[in-house]
Image (spheres, rainbow, N blue to C red):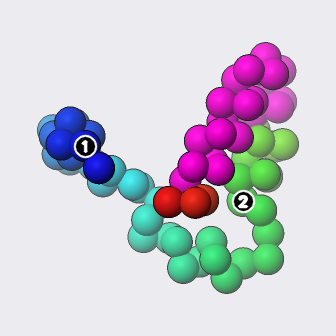
Amino acid sequence: MSNNRKAIADAFEREIDPLAEYSEIFETIDADAFGAFIEDVLETKNPTSGTVQGYERTIREYATS
């Protein structure tokens, strides 16, 4: 993790990974929370395919970290 990200998070009094505290819940539920976000929130805004791909890439990176 970069020191820049830590400094920015500290400056805004935020966590670097705001979902970290929920990781156990995400692992135990039988639902795709990120897929639901893409379908129910993102796609309703009619984004470009590049925008959707960007979100999907970020989600994949989060899921494998």
CA–CA distance between discs 2 and 1?
27 Å
Mark 2 nearby-residue class (10 Å; few <14, some 14–19, many ≥20): few
Q: Of marks 2 and 1, which one's residue comes earlier in the chain?
A: 1
Residue in view at x 79 percent, y 52 percent: 36
Q: What kind of element bears circle 1?
A: loop
Q: Examine the image and state in which quarter residue 42 appears.
A: top right
Q: Examine the image and state in which quarter residue 56 appears.
A: top right
Left/right of residue 37 with respect to residue 5 in the rendered view:
right
* Residue 51 drawn above or below residue 14: above
* Residue 25 drawn above or below residue 49: below
Residue in view at x 65 percent, y 50 percent: 60
Left/right of residue 15 with respect to residue 37 in the rendered view:
left
Q: Is residue 16 visible?
A: yes
Residue type highlighted by circle 2? Ala
Q: Tell me residue 22's x, y (percent).
A: 50, 70
Mark 1 nearby-residue class (10 Å; few <14, some 14–19, many ≥20): few
Q: Is residue 43 magenta?
A: yes
Magenta segment boundaries in residue numbering = 42-62
Residue 33, numbered label = 2
Residue placed most toward the observer, 49 or 30: 49
